[in-house]
Amino acid sequence: MDSTGDGIGDLNGIASKLAYLQALGVDAIWITPCFPSPQVDFGYDVSDYENIDSKYGTLADFATLEKLGAQHGIKIILDFVVNHTSDQHPWFINSRSSRSAEKRDWYIWRDGKAPNQPPNNWISTFGGSAWQWDSKTNQYYYHYFYPQQPDLNWRNPEVASAMYGTSEWWYQRGVSGFRLDAVDTLFEDPNLTDNPVLPGKNKYGDPNTENKYTHKLPEVHQVMRGLRQVADKYNAVLIGETWTENVGELKDYYGAKHDELQMPMDLMLTKLKFDASVFREHIAAVDASGEWPTWVISNHDIVRSWNRYGDGKHNDQIAKDMAAMYLTLRGTPIMYYGEEIGMQNNDPKRKEDVQDPIGRTGWPEEKGRDGERTPMQWNNTPNAGFTTGIPWNPIPITYKVYNVADELKDPTSILNWYKGLLALRHVDKALLDGDYVALNQDDPNVLSYLRRYQEDAALIVINMSASPQKVMFDLSRQGFSSGAAKTLMTTQSSLKNASSITQLSLEPFAVYIAELTR
Ligand code: GLC
């Protein structure tokens, strides 16, 4: 929400919407980087970790937001960009100034392999070599993201202590925790071993490589423990942007002694297709790890969940199915703003309209991330009520239907479905703390499970298919022999008063959530 009319959301804008967030059932908000930044990567290039960018407000506004947040029962989580700084950060300005500069070793500087040849074959995830030649000192520096985002050298203890100190600086100002950006890439092989080359090219035309020597090196865990030690002094939470390949890697991020991240994000979920069997298998694997899951279905880097899981015809229903699933699983769900109203991607139509630099380098295959970052749609007035000025990123015309004000009035809206689920989560012991028990595991269409807590259980049934389905439950083994149930929530009106779960007839994409009684 923009409070100043400059077309950009800001802290006072967020503060003005706390009542909405509270009514929605949000307990904490993660704000993407709002620190001073040249904005090459929309704030993920930080030039001062201990301040607020004037675009978004001031430190005083931040303090007000925290205070008002507390009054609404909402905690504030900041985004800590730990892998790299902006090339305009004073640390880098010093580092690049000479080979003997005080902070030279705070970044990763190396000689080329030969004239005009970078040190090795490492590729930036945003395209091209990850090494940038700097003619001032005739060396290359390493940047896994944009060249304006030089990687910090976490092998230097001064870097580690400066960064730990920054986290403490914010804890002392009342921040409840951090979402840690890009933790997978904190360390690189000090011998600069080439990454193995794979067949084919990526969307920027670079050879595909396996990230063997640049990703998830064991040293990462040492830093997670270091950050956790500071966090523990303030009872703060650490949430990780953890792009893991499998559940084993995800489990590692909690720490062997539970001394790393309390909440590494399960971003694997965002890559799965909408399919009951696929989800069931994934949930079982995550559950078997024994950790407390952190579910994520969308964020500012990937296509919106409404589009990604949707089949092009039943996207609203599928959005409700996804919400029913990840808001009732054991764990903590992290929502992306606008997901609760079914916001849709609005990808640029022309290359010249793209703002996110990767959308220009990768056009047309990669259109960048503008499409999932459009302003929140508050109502059906011009600019969706987000700003009185020109929105920084164009709003899709669908805002006329998909907006907070109109959806609040419609009992069957996606928004009211989210509100209902979140309200239930806050009061239902089984949904909060219950075990996950998979049911009807051979059913390819309907995902069903129990959340069981002592004598209580909630039953969740989601038809993930476009056809009607019949399901039967025999829960005698789980100790619910009667089959008696009380509907808690459903998308299907004929099930509102269902009292038995022995057999259920489900409409396409229907959701049924019930409390079981013994
Ligand atoms: C993370 C952020 C992304 C950013 C990148 C570099 O992946 O989510 O938006 O571009 O890190 O900081």
Image: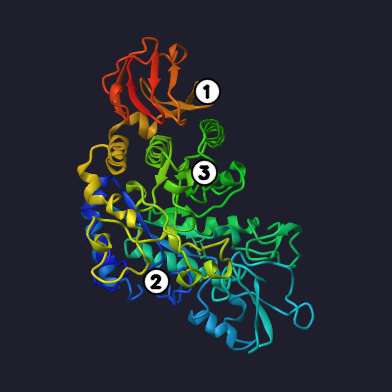
Residue 3 image position (x, y, % from top left): 24, 68
Residue mark closest to the camera, 2 vs 1? 1
Residue kind at label 2, given as amino acid type: Phe
Q: Amino acid at mark 1?
A: Asp
Please tell me whether mark 1 sits on a helix, a strand or a loop: loop
Instruction: Kindly tell me whether mark 3's CB lies below 8 Å from ligand 1.
Output: no
Residue at point 40% right, 62% down? Answer: 32
219 relative to 84 in the view: left or right: right
Q: Identify the mark nearer the N-term, 2 or 1.
A: 2
Q: Secondary structure at mark 2?
A: loop
- In the image, residue 380 sits, relative to residue 417, either above or below, namely below
Inspect this view and state whether residue 402 appears.
yes
Q: CA distance from mark 3 to mark 1?
A: 20 Å
Circle on res. 443: 1
Q: Quadrant of the N terminus?
A: bottom left
- Relative vertical location of residue 66 with respect to residue 161 in this rendering, above or below: above
Q: Are marks 3 and 1 in contact (CB under 8 Å)?
A: no
Q: Is residue 256 visible?
A: no
Secondary-structure class at tag 3: helix
Residue 29 or residue 154, whichever sits in front: 29
**Residue 222: image x %, image y %?**
59, 57
What residue would you read off at disc 2? Answer: 35
The amino acid marked with disc number 3 is Leu
Residue 5, x across and y down, in percent: 25, 72
Can you identify the residue that label 3 sits on?
269
Q: CA distance from mark 2 to mark 3?
A: 29 Å
Is the CB of mark 1 within 8 Å of ligand 1?
Answer: no
Q: Nearer the viewer, residue 276 or 33?
A: 276
Q: Is residue 212 left or right of residue 64?
A: right
How dense is the environment of label 3, judged by Cα within 10 Å: few (below 14), some, or many (20 and up)? some
Q: Quadrant of residue 300?
A: bottom left
Q: Residue at x 57, y 44 (%)?
A: 251
